[in-house]
Image: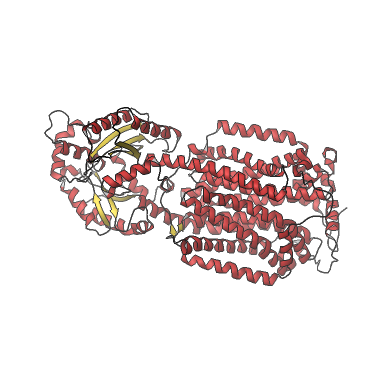
């Protein structure tokens, strides 16, 4: 019969009926559920695409079409075949200059590259000014993403030609540039993902062994998340057909979030099952009852993360807009697995899950941290004030925040594309390294007024924002006159576009080899119709990959617009690494401001539903916001003030906000729902003590697992991934050990029954109730729920 302890009768039947039914279902049909998960996962892996086949590695790929750098890129379309993407083939000798034998080998390799599938053209750019290197532009069919398997195979085939027999021993060849770098980044990302998965699994298993001191429990807790990860990857990849975008960060973060958060959900249930087994329940009833009690907490914990990630769809930056829904799909699958597959596994394995420390009937055991936290909340005001001072001090470090890393993450220095870029840096003008590209669209062909080429170049050089400028007049560091190029055009135009001319002078054209090579090289800087001209420049502000260069882009765009006016251009643009980085930084900052209030509102609404209160969600959201500011301040302190970096990666504040806000609410929900459960039959201080003691070990274990999986990123990824990993790990630890288990319970004690306003519980006064022993209270509440779990008596072991 229902239990009454001095207040209105508690009727848990209606409140728990849904999850009680789910508990009975998963226990009764445990074997079909396990088989169904295996079959569905195998089908998804075999018949849907993989994440690596759809990911993008460039931040600029995620910019909207309205951004200035994307529009500038569109201006460059006449300079290359439609849909084509480019790489640079470069050969360099270890000697003083290229020999005739070297030239023969290079010609042979260029011919072989032209026959590689997906290669549409090879445009030789001639020999460098120092005579030690020669390069060519290799165009690939870009109608499919540059990071898919076909392009990766084509790049591998091109590089295989470098090892052809007869190549001089001192001649070294590389493939670098956009396509090659993207493929190398993809390969590097795949290796990082594999290492992340292995280290995450090992870390979680080690921590679970320490937590449970049991043989099977760690594997049972982790298995649903692993199965969910296998199933979610193909689902996220398939979702790209409905507009979800996948970056090279998606597989890595999907692994960490699903293994970390998914295992947390499993811990919520397993700890409660162990608690019920100690109270004497048979296995089937213990599993069903535990799901009945914590199923709502697990579900709403998952919903908060899903809702926060789904809210990111309002972002303009495609990286954010795609990453949010992709991870939300993963969390949804992990939630489903832990609500169905995990209870089925627990029902099948029974008490053996905890062997050799099989739970024995007796009083509940509480971890050391739970006992310490129970004592600390006895002084709630002191705890709260000390916590606010500590977190406020960390948050002050945010005043030194400076964003960096707006551009793409470079491939490994040992990759072929990185070594090839080093050759270009050493043997060609500095504008060739990571050039900022200037584009002008003219009303008529430049061949009618070739002096426009020199006028534009001089205008750019005198603007004060460029350190060096090169174009059609000096593509390889050797200056040619506008008149000489115009003369070559007049003689060679009948043979077709300059990009399609053969390596040697056709027919009896009266041009020297140098003049012929200069005209062919100019094809990259003058379009076939002569109306689009291009210049490559290095910036006065610094390397194009630097933050200073991105910040200088507004002035650079203004200078280019002035030159465009002086030469009568109808359109102009600035493309390349720095302009894209500037647009990424602007749009990403605007997105954070736009998304922040939406996520806060969504989380507050979900908390209001699960806690049946309008008061608790307010301070819970504020507590997570304080945790976020302190965590970001700690990241600034570590990376900038102590580490000496120029700033922290621009994506870190966004990821920290979304993950700490969403994942922090997981622990809020677990602790607060347990406090609410206890508050039905005890004074608030007693309810808080019991709840913190019961959930302290669960929350801290879950927090350590989640922080550890993010911490794994510091050992596996590039600088961007390391900053994300360390920042999120530190934020989760702060949130777990201080906010959830100390500050929030302190506020609950101070507010008393007002925590639950306007629900009926806020009108119940248990402050003068006799304190009933913990086990007696638990037994009474369990008696109320007997009708929900009794049907399982015949299936329990």
Of residue 451 and residue 210, the one placed in the foreground of this image is 210
In the image, residue 598 sits, relative to residue 514, either above or below, namely: below
Of residue 503 and residue 80, the one placed in the foreground of this image is 503
The coloring applied to the image is: secondary structure
What is the residue that sits farthest to the right in this orientation?
1
For residue 111, what is the image quadrant? top left
Q: Position of residue 172 (x, y in %)?
A: 31, 37
- Residue 500 appearing in the image: no
For residue 679, what is the image quadrant? bottom right
Q: Position of residue 720 (x, y in %)?
A: 47, 52
In the image, taking residue 115 as reference, residue 268 lies left or right, namely: right
Can you say which quadrant of the picture contains the C terminus?
Answer: top right
In the image, taking residue 463 as reference, residue 306 lies left or right, namely: right
Residue drawn at x 40%, y 43% is 414
Q: Position of residue 783 (x, y in %)?
A: 86, 51
Q: Give the number of callouts.
A: 0
Residue drawn at x 71%, y 67% is 376
In the image, residue 481 sits, relative to residue 613, either above or below, namely: above
Of residue 318 and residue 460, the one placed in the foreground of this image is 460
- Residue 564 appearing in the image: yes
What is the residue that sits farthest to the left in this orientation?
510
In the image, taking residue 290 as reference, residue 466 lies left or right, namely: left
Q: Position of residue 241 (x, y in %)?
A: 50, 38
């Amino acid at each position: 019969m229902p239990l009454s302890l001095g207040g209105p009768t508690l009727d848990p039947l209606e409140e728990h009926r849904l999850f009680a039914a789910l508990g009975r279902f998963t226990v009764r049909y445990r074997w079909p559920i396990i088989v169904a998960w295996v079959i569905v996962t195998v089908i998804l892996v075999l018949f849907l695409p993989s994440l690596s086949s759809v990911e993008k590695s460039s931040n600029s790929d995620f910019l909207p079409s309205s951004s200035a750098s994307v529009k500038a890129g569109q201006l460059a379309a006449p300079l290359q075949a439609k849909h084509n993407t480019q790489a640079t083939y470069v050969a360099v000798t270890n000697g003083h200059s290229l020999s005739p034998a070297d030239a023969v080998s290079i010609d042979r390799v260029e011919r072989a590259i032209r026959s590689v599938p997906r290669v549409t053209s090879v445009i030789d750019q001639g020999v460098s000014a120092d005579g030690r290197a020669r390069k060519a532009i290799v165009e690939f069919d870009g109608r499919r993403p540059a990071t898919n398997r076909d392009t990766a195979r084509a790049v591998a085939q091109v590089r295989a030609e470098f090892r052809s027999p007869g190549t001089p021993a001192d001649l070294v060849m590389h493939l670098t540039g956009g396509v090659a770098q993207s493929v190398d980044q993809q390969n590097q990302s795949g290796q990082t993902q594999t290492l992340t998965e292995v280290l995450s699994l090992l870390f979680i298993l080690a921590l679970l062994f320490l937590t449970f001191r049991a043989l099977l429990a760690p594997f049972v807790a982790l298995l649903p998340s692993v199965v969910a990860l296998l199933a979610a990857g193909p689902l996220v990849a398939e979702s790209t057909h409905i507009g979800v975008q996948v970056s090279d960060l998606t597989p890595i973060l999907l692994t960490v979030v699903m293994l970390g958060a998914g295992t947390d959900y499993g811990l919520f249930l397993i700890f409660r099952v162990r608690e019920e087994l100690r109270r004497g329940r048979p296995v089937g009833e213990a599993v069903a009852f535990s799901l009945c009690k914590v199923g709502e907490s697990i579900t709403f914990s998952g919903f908060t993360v899903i809702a926060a990630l789904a809210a990111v769809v309002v972002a303009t930056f495609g990286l954010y807009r795609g990453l949010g829904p992709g991870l939300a799909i993963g969390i949804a699958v992990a939630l489903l697995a832990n609500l169905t597959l995990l209870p089925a596994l627990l029902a099948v394995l029974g008490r053996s899950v905890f062997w050799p420390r099989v739970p024995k009937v007796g009083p509940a055991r509480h971890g050391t941290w739970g006992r310490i936290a129970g004592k600390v909340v006895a002084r709630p005001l002191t705890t709260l004030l000390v916590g606010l001072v500590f977190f406020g001090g960390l948050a002050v470090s945010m005043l030194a925040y400076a964003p960096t890393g707006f551009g793409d993450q470079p491939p490994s220095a040992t990759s072929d594309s990185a070594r090839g870029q080093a050759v270009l840096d050493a043997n060609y003008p500095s504008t060739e390294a990571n050039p900022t590209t200037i584009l002008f669209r003219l009303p008529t062909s430049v061949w009618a007024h070739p002096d426009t080429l020199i006028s534009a170049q001089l205008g750019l050089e005198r603007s004060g924002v460029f350190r060096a400028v090169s174009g059609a007049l000096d593509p390889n560091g050797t200056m040619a006159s506008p008149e000489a190029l115009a003369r070559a055009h007049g003689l060679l135009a009948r043979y077709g576009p300059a990009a399609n001319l053969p390596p040697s002078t056709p027919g009896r054209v009266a041009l020297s080899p140098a003049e012929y090579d200069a005209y062919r090289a100019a094809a990259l800087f003058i379009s076939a119709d002569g109306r689009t001209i291009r210049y490559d420049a290095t910036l006065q502000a610094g390397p194009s990959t630097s933050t200073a260069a991105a910040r200088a882009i507004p002035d650079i765009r203004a200078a280019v617009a002035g030159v465009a006016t002086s030469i009568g251009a109808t359109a102009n643009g600035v493309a390349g690494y720095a302009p894209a980085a500037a647009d990424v930084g602007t749009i990403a900052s605007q997105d954070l401001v736009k998304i922040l209030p939406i996520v806060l509102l969504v989380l507050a609404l979900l908390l209001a539903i699960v806690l049946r209160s309008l008061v608790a969600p307010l301070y819970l959201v504020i507590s997570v916001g304080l945790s976020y500011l302190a965590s970001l301040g700690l990241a600034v302190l570590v990376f900038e003030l102590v580490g000496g970096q120029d700033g922290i990666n621009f994506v870190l504040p966004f990821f920290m906000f979304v993950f700490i806000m969403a994942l922090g609410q997981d622990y809020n929900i677990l602790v607060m729902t347990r406090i609410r459960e206890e508050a039905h039959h005890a004074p608030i201080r007693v309810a808080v003590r019991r709840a913190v003691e019961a959930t302290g070990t669960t929350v801290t274990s879950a927090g350590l697992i989640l922080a550890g999986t993010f911490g794994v990123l510091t050992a596996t990824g590039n600088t961007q991934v390391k900053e994300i990993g360390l920042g999120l790990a530190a934020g989760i630890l702060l949130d777990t050990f201080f906010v959830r288990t100390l500050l929030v319970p302190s506020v609950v004690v101070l507010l008393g029954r007002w925590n639950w306003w306007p629900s009926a519980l806020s009108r119940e006064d248990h402050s003068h109730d006799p304190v009933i022993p913990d086990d007696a209270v638990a037994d009474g509440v369990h008696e109320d729920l007997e009708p929900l779990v009794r049907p399982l008596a015949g299936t329990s072991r």
